[in-house]
Amino acid sequence: MQPTDLPPQGGDDGLTTPDPTYFSDNAPTSGDLAATPSGDAPPPPATTPPAVTGGRGPNPRLLLLAGVATVVVLALVASAVAFARGMLNQTPTPSAILTSAENAHLTDATYTLTDQLTLVYTSSSSGGTPTTLNLTGNGKLTKSPTRNDVTLSIPLLGAQNTIEVITDGSDVYANIGALADLLGGSGVNVPKGKWIKVPAGMAIPTILDYSHLTNLKLIGTDTINGKATWHIQGTLSMPHGAGAATPNPGASATATAVATQYGLSVPPVTEDLWFQQGTYYPAKFVVNFSASATKAPSIGGSKGGSAGPAHVTNAATLTFSEWNTGATVTVPSPDQVVSLPSGAFGSGS
């Protein structure tokens, strides 16, 4: 091929000869181009993530359901707490309190006693002059066997005298010491230190026997010896007539067993009882009653008048201090007991 056969430069076919100045004047500097990795292909241009316009964000419906579920759970928890508090703070009925007291895990208890006994002889020879005895003492009881032991200090015959009374089922034992003169003309000689066995003729109700309480009502709550208690009140009905036991022997009959065991006619009595809220152990008992005695012994010297009909009022308070300490009550042995014959203290004929 000859040179003349080549197409001319700048012809119609669009092929041109590059201008050498283009590369020198317009070549990018090192600051304009990033380093090109080895190879023929240039690096891909840097990209910016597109803005999210309607992509998958948090679902409002799921958020709403989660919120509702949270509210429901919180409401259920609050309701459960309120219910539990309500159950814990629920006020029991008086009957429920007595049932809990009867079923309490109590084996023994100790207590203190104050008792004011007033006798007014109603016979014409007595002149109606009252004789008041202020008794103080302390005692202990056991549930199995069912026994009660109380020691009392009694101002009689111009001196402060001490007696001890033990009840065991239907048996009453009394160690009356210097008060043996109260037996009068019974003909019984009680040597010093010996016990008198009183034939009660019926089972003596115990301090913890609540079966005779009726007309129960809840008075409220109190704090006794630093412990929260339930205060209930009831009517204590007992047999009438000679030979009937006085109400609640621990608080009243025990305190007056020697002087007023027989010949009493006792109308319904109001008794107040306090029980600990946690254990339902007895905390305090109060008994106030009045009664008529068909035959009352002459006590208290010239102020007491002669033996005969009398009106008796009694106010007894029993305050418990210890529970389940292992206390025991032992009845006197037969060789330490002198049986009391019929007719003593105005009983029998």
Image (cartoon, helix red, strand yellow):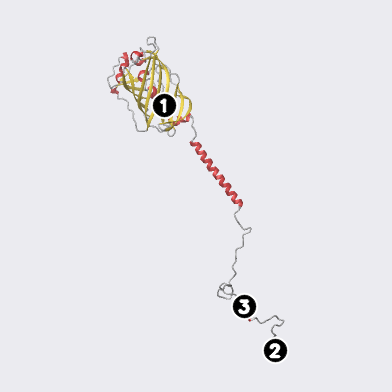
What residue sits right under mark 2 in the picture? 4
> What SS does tag 2 mark?
helix
Q: Label 3, label 1: how many angstroms apart (C-alpha)?
A: 119 Å
**Identity, as a three-letter code, of the amino acid under mark 2:** Thr
- Most extreme residue toward the front is 25
> Which mark, by number, is residue 285?
1
Res 240 quadrant in image? top left
Left or right: residue 212 compared with residue 13: left
Q: Is residue 114 visible?
A: yes
- Most extreme residue toward the left is 191
The residue at 54%/44% (across/down) is 74
Res 130 quadrant in image? top left
Res 99 quadrant in image? top left
Q: How many marks?
A: 3
> Which mark, by number, is residue 25?
3
**Identity, as a three-letter code, of the amino acid under mark 3:** Asp
> What SS does tag 1 mark?
strand
- Tag 3 and tag 1, C-beta contact below 8 Å: no
The residue at 63%/78% (across/down) is 22
Query: Where's residue 321, x and y in %?
Result: 37, 30
CA neighbours of label 3 inside 10 A, class few (<14), some (14 to 19), many (20+): few
**Identity, as a three-letter code, of the amino acid under mark 1:** Phe
Query: Which one is in front in this view, the residue at disc 3 or the one at disc 1?
Result: 3
> What SS does tag 3 mark?
helix
Question: Which residue occupies the foreground of this view, 275 or 153?
Answer: 153
Query: Where's residue 14, x and y in %?
Result: 70, 80
- N-term mark: 3 or 2: 2
Query: Which one is in front in this view, the residue at disc 1 or the one at disc 2?
Result: 2
